[in-house]
Amino acid sequence: MSQAQTIEVAWAPQAGPQTAFIKCPHFEVFFGGARGGGKTDAVLGDWVTHAAKHGPDAIGLMVRRTRTELLETFERARTIYTKLGATATINPMRFNMPNGARITYAYLERDSDAETYQGASFTRVYVEEAGNFPSPSPILKLMATLRSGAGIPVGLRLTGNPGGPGHQWVRARYIDPAPLGWRKIVDKATGLNRIYIPSRVSDNHYLGPDYVQRLKASGSPELVRAWLEGDWSVVSGAFFPEFSLDRHVIASRPIPEHWARFRSFDWGSARPFCCHWWAVSDGSDPDIARGALVLYREWYGMRPGEPNVGLKLTAEAVAQGIAARETDDPQPMLGVADPAIFAEDGGPSIAQRMMGQGVMFRPADNKRVPSRGAMGGWDQLRSRLVGDDDGRPMALFFSTARDLIRTLPAMQHDDARPEDIDTDAEDHCCDCARYGMMSRPWIKDAAKPVVRDSWDIAFERAGAEPVDGWRVA
């Protein structure tokens, strides 16, 4: 009898979502949800299976947002792949499997980095922590690299958790169409199939109860729920916890014609632009506090179904769209806008080009955080959300302002500057609202809202007289 041999297993998928992920036949698979759900190992195991089946025709690419994140995944892969006889190189970061299959590791710190892969061919593209990408653009560009002259089935595989600057686009693309997952989604534009495979911490049988206990001690109940259950309706690290659908969102209603009105604007081309129209309550509506700002109209220049991707309209086209939406407004309309649109760079500024279409702005106060005792824009927005001493909010949004309502509760703190928003997120509506708030700053203890005299200056520049309602009596 021959002596029994001990066979070392480098890795084996756990029953449940990990196994389903590796066997999934769909072109695009998102494996997401709870922390500790075994997503990284599922990706590494999927490549082993793909490489073993297709040999030298299997060519893979693994990407993460930053080099630090990439190194963590690379080291975890090393512990598995070298046991299978793979050799690793550092420059480039690559694993060469014994049968000729190979996978390259790279990071996409900037969206433009994806363009360096134009002309490349891969049979598998893996994106770890997709929610760390503010926009899906670089990931979608990588889809063009998925091709095989040998006829190998190609596929895109992604992982992610709730939260992060890309929370909104990930949720819109994978979770909202099938919140419970496990259902094929057919892309209307391409006809390609994608699917969301939800993960829970309980799916990873290698994690003991101490891991769950540590998670429970690490944050608020809402944050812990997102981590443990993969709840995409919960946003970790919310910057505006004061926001409430019940308190701040109201049904559309007629705005009294004598209420002051103005607009705020945040420019965008590759990223969305945003225009908000505001009315200032004089207290005549018993349901709305005197001095409250009411957002009664919103225009968000986002490509349909692609959060954080702009329409790339010209300044003239945007101005014409703004003017068309103001046809029925009873007062001459002026506004505040991001000061960046007033910069002249070898030609007329964006503001000048919009003025040529009859749409005028003045530079907004762009202060984001407090400095030298002055209130910052985020504090101004937060104070209006909190409201007056009677608990009435000083900022209200019509339910038609869908994109502000969608993105404001998803804003998160910047890790390096906690008093500011993570600017990689889809913050355009919030910036636009901030400009509006700073143009009419409100102080809780003041008897009256503060209105800036610069509105009069703006009217004079426009060649018009101030109209009733611009000042709060």
Image: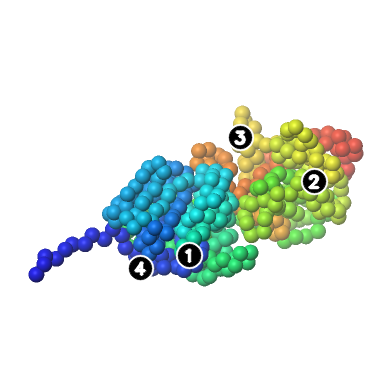
Looking at the rendered structure, which numbered label has been put on residue 316?
2
**Alpha carbon separation for disc pair 3 and 2:** 34 Å
Task: From the viewer's side, name the closer residue of 253 and 44.
Answer: 44
Q: Is residue 19 visible?
A: yes
Please name the residue that numbered disc 4 is placed on. Answer: 15
Dot 2 or dot 1: first in sequence order is 1
Looking at the rendered structure, which numbered label has been put on residue 151?
1
- Can you say which quadrant of the picture contains the N terminus? bottom left
Task: From the viewer's side, name the closer residue of 176 and 306.
Answer: 306
Answer with the quarter of the image where residue 91 lies: top left
How far across and down, in percent of the image, does residue 345 sit? 73, 33
**Alpha carbon separation for disc pair 3 and 1:** 58 Å
How far across and down, in percent of the image, does residue 22 sit? 41, 65
Q: Secondary structure at mark 1?
A: loop
**Alpha carbon separation for disc pair 4 and 3:** 52 Å
The residue at 62%/41% (across/down) is: 379
- Can you say which quadrant of the picture contains the C terminus? top right
Q: Secondary structure at mark 3?
A: loop
Please name the residue that numbered disc 3 is placed on. Answer: 370
Q: Amino acid at mark 1?
A: Gly
Answer with the quarter of the image where residue 469 lies: top right
Q: Amino acid at mark 4?
A: Ala
* Outermost residue toward the top in this view: 372
- Label pair 3/2, CB-CB below 8 angstroms: no
Q: Amino acid at mark 2?
A: Glu
Dot 3 or dot 1: first in sequence order is 1
Dot 4 or dot 1: first in sequence order is 4
**Alpha carbon separation for disc pair 2 and 4:** 57 Å
Please name which of the two marks, 4 or 3, marks the residue nearer to the observer.
4
Residue 169 vs 414, above or below: the answer is: below
Dot 4 or dot 3: first in sequence order is 4
